[in-house]
Structure formats: C-alpha cells, structure tokens
Amino acid sequence: MTTHRELLWAGIERLREAGAETPRLDAEVLLGFAAGVDRTVILAHPDALVGDGPAAAFRAAVERRVAGEPVAYIRGVKEFHGIALMVDPRVLIPRPETELLVDEALTETMGRLTAGAAAAVPGGAPTALRVVDVGTGSGAVAIALAVGLRARRVPAEEVAILAVDLSTDALDVARENAVGHAVGDRLSFAAADLLPPPGSEPWDLVLANLPYVRGDAMAGLPAPTHFEPALALDGGIDGLEVISRLLEQLPAALALGGVALLEIGADQGDAIGLLVGERLPGWRCRVVPDLSGLPRVAAIEREAAA
C-alpha cells in the first residue's frame, strides 16, 4: 500500500510531463475521486494509506487525463452555480462563465414576478411566467435557475421552465440531473432545433448558451474540448450562425416586453449588437460583461407594445 502523498506526487509528475495545464489540481481531484473522498481530505491527510483498488483507479484516471480526457468526464460530475451536475460525452461540460447567464436569468425572473405581483388584479387568476432554455445540454442553466427559484421560495406553478435540445441524448442527461436536484416538477423537456414550434402562449424569457466558437478556431481549442460534442461548440464561420438562427425565430416566439438572454463569446460584443440591429430592428440589445469586464451575455429586449 502507498500513501496519499506518494500517489499524489507521482500523478502530478505524470501529468506535468504530459503537458497538463493544471497538473496539481487535476491530480488532487482525481485522487479524491478514486479514493471516494473530497480533495481536501487528501491534502489534510497526506500520510494516510490508500488501498490497492483506489490506487489502481487513480493511476487509470491519470492516464485518461494524460490522453486529454476532461477531468469532469472522468469523474462524471461538474460543479456549476453551487450544484453538482452529472456530465459525460453526450453533453458539453458547463463552464464557470455561463453562471453569469443564470444570474441574469434569476434577476430577470424575480423582477418580473415582483412586478407581476404588484400589478395583479385582486382575485385574478395568476399566469405563470414562461421561460425556455434553448440548447440545454446537461440542463445546467435551466436546473440552476429552478434551484435558485426554489431557494427564493418561488412556488413551482409561478414559473414554467422548458428545457430544449436538438440531442435526445443530452435531454436524457438533463432529465437525470433535474431529478437528482429535485426540480423535476419545475421543468419540462422537449426535443427541437432551437425553439419548439410556437404554442398558444409566447415566451417571456428565452435563455440560450448556444455554440459560438468560429468554425476555423475549432481545431485550435484545448485538447479536452475535443472530447466534447462538436455540435455544442461550433458556431459556424463567424461563430454566430446558430445564434443568428435563434434571432430569426424570436419575433414569432418572444412575448411583447420579453427578453432573450444569450451567452456570447468574449470577442462578440460588437457583432451581436450589429446582428440584432439587422435582424430585429427596433429591439434593444445590451451586453453584460463578466467579472473580467469581457462581453458575456447579450440581453435582447422586445418593446412592450408593438
């Protein structure tokens, strides 16, 4: 048997030699995964003995990482907006920058609920706020929103959330994650290419983290991204082809006064404004920067009156 310290250092060296960007962090996380404990336990107890089984599992995990496989796929879990989501090669791994999209969605949803409550007619039947998450993948955005609304004590019937994806495999992952976080009663799912066919009621809020990587930049992405579905990354020639198709659908789908919140690339702040002006004349577009001051979310607002 060997110790946490010995295994950890061997893993770090193996990953460093292979050119891993974060060899120490990767080794710590993978050793904790193999040993069935949090990485803080590994660091707090460096001389603890590790059985042959966990040691072998760790070495195998390190070799998978050396081959370029993302740590999230090896573990089968990715933390996002305070929750842990199941992930595998059927879905894109949620990125930290996408948490801003959830924050903006929570702010917008709560603001609309508050305004609706203030304007409600006594005795009138309440109408649920309609939200759709386009290209949901693992369900990260929709589930984080639902969890956030539950934490704010918003009744499930006040916000109807639909999670949509072209991939039925991705929807299977999203459904499992929704059940795992006990928000299955707050979400519904549908397979569609972007927005589903228009229903009887338009959407109040459209959320989307769609592919926005330029096609000619795909080959130069870090090795771990090559394990992820290209469909969830490749945004076409200018990176905005899929987003552009969604914009074309908004006039028939977004309610008057509705808002679409779209994640964009850090270099697409000006381009999205020009695209909205071209495709949706008269609509407003503001770009919300991330903590680094880079463009990250485009908020596209439709006038309340036609």
Image (cartoon, helix red, strand yellow):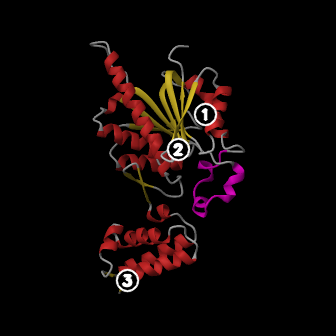
In the image, 66 versus 170, the foreground residue is 66
| Residue beneath disc 3 | 52
Q: Is residue 221 magenta?
A: yes
Q: Quadrant of residue 54?
A: bottom left
Q: Quadrant of residue 18?
A: bottom right
| Residue beneath disc 2 | 293
Q: Are marks 3 and 2 in contact (CB under 8 Å)?
A: no
Q: Are marks 2 and 1 in contact (CB under 8 Å)?
A: no
Q: Quadrant of the N terminus?
A: bottom left
Label placed on residue 61: none
Start-end of magenta stretch? 215-235
Frontmost of labels 2 and 1 is 2
The reply to whether residue 203 is visible in this rendering is: yes
- Amino acid carrying mark 3 in the image: Asp
Direction from residue 64 to residue 50 in the image, left or right: left
Frontmost of labels 3 and 1 is 1
| Residue beneath disc 1 | 246
* Rendered location of residue 134, percent (x, y): 53, 38
The reply to whether residue 196 is visible in this rendering is: no
Circle 3 packing at 10 Å, graded few (<14), some (14-19), many (20+), is: few
Please tell me whether mark 3 sits on a helix, a strand or a loop: helix
- Amino acid carrying mark 1 in the image: Leu
| For marks 3 and 2 on the same chain, the one whose residue lies earlier in the sequence | 3
| For marks 2 and 1 on the same chain, the one whose residue lies earlier in the sequence | 1
Cα distance, mark 2 to mark 1?
A: 26 Å
| For marks 3 and 1 on the same chain, the one whose residue lies earlier in the sequence | 3
In the image, residue 12 above or below residue 81: below
Q: Is residue 83 magenta?
A: no
